Structures are given as structure tokens and as C-alpha cells.
Amino acid sequence: DTGVSQNPRHKITKRGQNVTFRCDPISEHNRLYWYRQTLGQGPEFLTYFQNEAQLEKSRLLSDRFSAERPKGSFSTLEIQRTEQGDSAMYLCASSAGGDPRPLHFGNGTRLTVT
Amino acid sequence: EDKVVQSPLSLVVHEGDTVTLNCSYEVTNFRSLLWYKQEKKAPTFLFMLTSSGIEKKSGRLSSILDKKELFSILNITATQTGDSAIYLCAYSSYRSNTGKLIFGQGTTLQVKP
């Protein structure tokens, strides 16, 4: 169990640029989640994958956000035309099937939009 | 609308003190309640509670769920500076079959030497 891995750890970008983050879940976990966390708040759910299928998206996920999980392994989260309000910690989590199960989180990617 | 509320939002204690953190919830089709500890990075899992009145314990930390009164508490005895962190409470609901967790705002605990 090598844990959930996220890259990059930090990303600074100018407003209007596109950014992409990567998440490698725990290898035997078929469930993958993306969350966003801002200062002083708990993580907010963005989207969920079961294997390669994206089964739920939060209304927080505007059309500038897109997530993929090709082949049901790693996942990417892309933000197009970044805005300053996108500055946050983006957390990825995974879990095995069967409920209820705790989610295992990665260390996150901290995005700063200048 | 489902919600989870943590209190207090922040707390400062001295080493050796005992603290109690609170999490109240209003959730349709409640399934489970979880506690996480978050230092500078990833939230790390502490406890998952599904049954009322059964205490989960790990070292100096313990937690219990009251499904009648809709709350959970996390107790930390003999606090140490390493307990300084944000403690997050989260729930899952049968309304969603994704297993996603909905988090409270968190309680920031600072333990002073």
C-alpha cells in the first residue's frame, strides 16, 4: 500500500491559463474522488469515479473543470481558463468497493492563481 | 438539506489537557460518520462509526456516536503537541451509492507545551 499519490504538489499559474493535476490511487481501489479545500473549510466533493466511469459530479464543478480516469487507474483533473477563485487545495481520495468504507486521501495539489 | 456542524471551530489547550470535539448532523438516510485528522497535508482516517453507543478507541483518542440525538464526539486525553491539527467530521448517506463523504468545517486544535 503505497498510498494515494498526487502531482504536482504545488502549482502557481496566471489567470486564464489551463492546469492539469494527476492522481494515482491505491492500486486495488476502484473508487476515486476529487475534493477541493479552501482555507478554514472542510473538503468539498467535486466528482466521483467508479473504475473508468464518472458517476457523479457536484454542481461546484463548472464547465471549466473536467476529470478523467482512463482505464480505471490514474485520474486527471483539468481546469481551463483558471480564475483566482480556483485557488485551493485539490485533494484526491480512493477507496475499495463495498460500503461503508473510509476514503484514503493524497497530500493534495495546492493551486495558486495569480 | 443535509448538513454537518462541528464545534468549536477552534480550541487552544495545554499539554496534558483533555479535549472533546463535537459533530452534529442532520442527514437523510444516514449511513456512517467518520473522523479525520488533518495536519498540513492529507486528512488521515481516525474512526468510522455506524452504530449508536459503541465507542471506538485508539490510544488516547476515542469516539462515540449517538444516532438518537444526531451527534458524535471525539475525545483526546492527555493531549500532546503532536495532536495539534484540524479534526474533520464527515458523513456518508444511503442517498448516494458512491460512498462519498460530506465534511464539516473542521475544528482547529492547538496544543501548547
Image (cartoon, coloured by chain):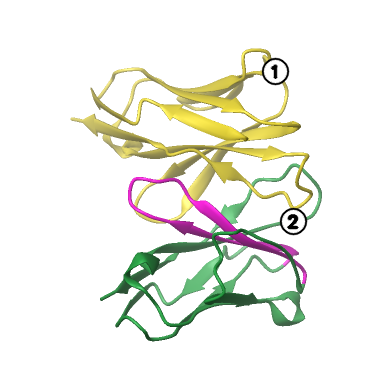
Chain colours: A green, B yellow
**Is residue B90 something one can see in this rendering?**
yes
Disc ID at residue A23: none
Q: Which residue is mark 1?
A: B52
Residue A48 spot, x, y in % from top left = 68, 62
Secondary structure of the residue carrying tag 1 is loop
Marks 2 and 1, how far apart in space? Answer: 24 Å
Amino acid under label 1?
Answer: Ser
As drawn, is B112 to the left or to the right of B29? left
Q: Is A58 inside the magenta-drawn segment?
A: no
Amino acid under label 2?
Answer: Ala
Depicted A22 relative to depicted A108: above or below: below
Residue B86 spot, x, y in % from top left = 38, 40
Depicted B106 relative to depicted A29: above or below: above
**Is residue A29 something one can see in this rendering?**
no
Instruction: Indicate the chain on which mark 2 is placed.
Output: A
For the point 29% across and 18% down, which residue is it?
A: B17
For the point 74% across and 75% down, which residue is it?
A: A72
Residue B48 found in image quarter:
top right
Depicted A16 relative to depicted B90: above or below: below
Residue B31 spot, x, y in % from top left = 73, 34
Residue A73 spot, x, y in % from top left = 70, 76
Q: Nearer the viewer, mark 2 or mark 1?
A: 1
Q: Tell me if mark 1 has few (under 14), some (14-19) or many (20+) residues whose alpha carbon lies within 10 angstroms of its own.
A: some
For the point 40% across and 46% down, which residue is it?
A: A41
Depicted B12 relative to depicted B87: above or below: above
Secondary structure of the residue carrying tag 2 is loop
Q: Which residues are magenta?
A: A28-51
Given residues A63 and B10, the one toward you in this image is: A63
Q: Which residue is mark 2?
A: A96
